[in-house]
Image (spheres, coloured by chain):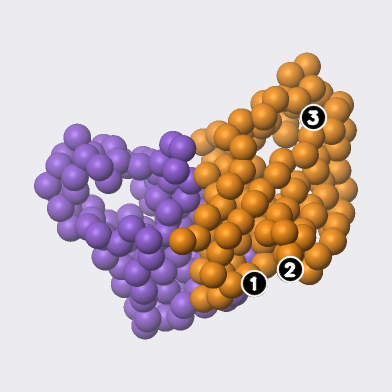
Chain colours: A orange, B purple
Amino acid sequence: GQNIDQPTEMTATEGAIVQINCTYQTSGFNGLFWYQQHAGEAPTFLSYNVLDGLEEKGRFSSFLSRSKGYSYLLLKELQMKDSASYLCAVTDSNYQLIWGAGTKLIIKP
Amino acid sequence: IAGITQAPTSQILAAGRRMTLRCTQDMRHNAMYWYRQDLGLGLRLIHYSNTAGTTGKGEVPDGYSVSRANTDDFPLTLASAVPSQTSVYFCASSAEPNTQYFGPGTRLTVL
């Protein structure tokens, strides 16, 4: 079957760095997405990786290793507004998005 | 309009009633999707449409139907609502097969 695993919840301190991991087992691979979702709001696009390596976008970076079925989202200089759920999703061989359950990130002052 | 809109924002519905959730996008995206999101389960695909005039079933299609008469609109109908359909419903669109953009969601409660 197809499966996306990510931690249910993480806690970090304002100003620090946090890494949210995602492992996947899917039928085929056509890219991996990270989305941010604040409580009561819609998911919003953060990043897309299709090749191995690190993609940096401001305070956020996303890494992909296709051979390991692994990705992480790195958030630097954490701010209180980064408190949200972070969703990992993989596009399979049929170009359907398979979603993880999300990681709830709690930022403490 | 800029992006995707959904209506209503929230709704309380008696079991057995029929309900249509509306979704409209103005980005001329070919593909559109309906998801439900339940606590601890993440987003689950109900139905999708790769282009106007075509639809397909997702992971949890039972009890739901969709139509795609044109590019912009993708309504989701619950023919006879049941309490297990209480959820938050998100519509999304994409310039297939790329990034999906989400509407603000509809919070539906079936009593």
Q: Which residue is mark 2?
A: A50
Three-letter amino acid code of the residue under disc 2? Val
Quarter of image, res A7: top right
Distance from Cα at disc 2 to Cα at disc 1: 6 Å
Looking at the picture, does residue B52 appear above or below residue A67? below
**Chain containing the residue with disc 1:** A
> Which element type, helix, strand or loop, lies under badge 3?
loop
> Counting other residues with Cα less than 10 Å from the Cα at mark 3, is it few (<14), some (14-19), or many (20 or more)?
some
Q: How far, Cα to Cα, is label 1 from label 3? A: 32 Å
Amino acid on which the number 3 mark rests in the picture: Gln
Q: Residue at x 42, y 81 (%)?
A: B52
* Amino acid bearing label 1: Asn
| Contact, mark 1 vs mark 3 (Cβ under 8 Å) | no
Q: Earlier in the sequence, mark 2 or mark 3?
A: 2
Task: Give the number of the disc on residue A30.
Answer: 1
**Disc 2: which chain?**
A
Q: Position of residue A105 (x, y in %)?
A: 66, 32
Q: CA distance from mark 2 to mark 3?
A: 28 Å
Which residue in the structure is indicated by mark 3? A79
Q: Find residue A93 and report its image quarter.
A: bottom right
Residue at image coords 79%, 22%: A13
Q: Are marks 2 and 1 in contact (CB under 8 Å)?
A: yes
Can residue B65 be spotted in the picture? yes
The label shown at residue B80 is none
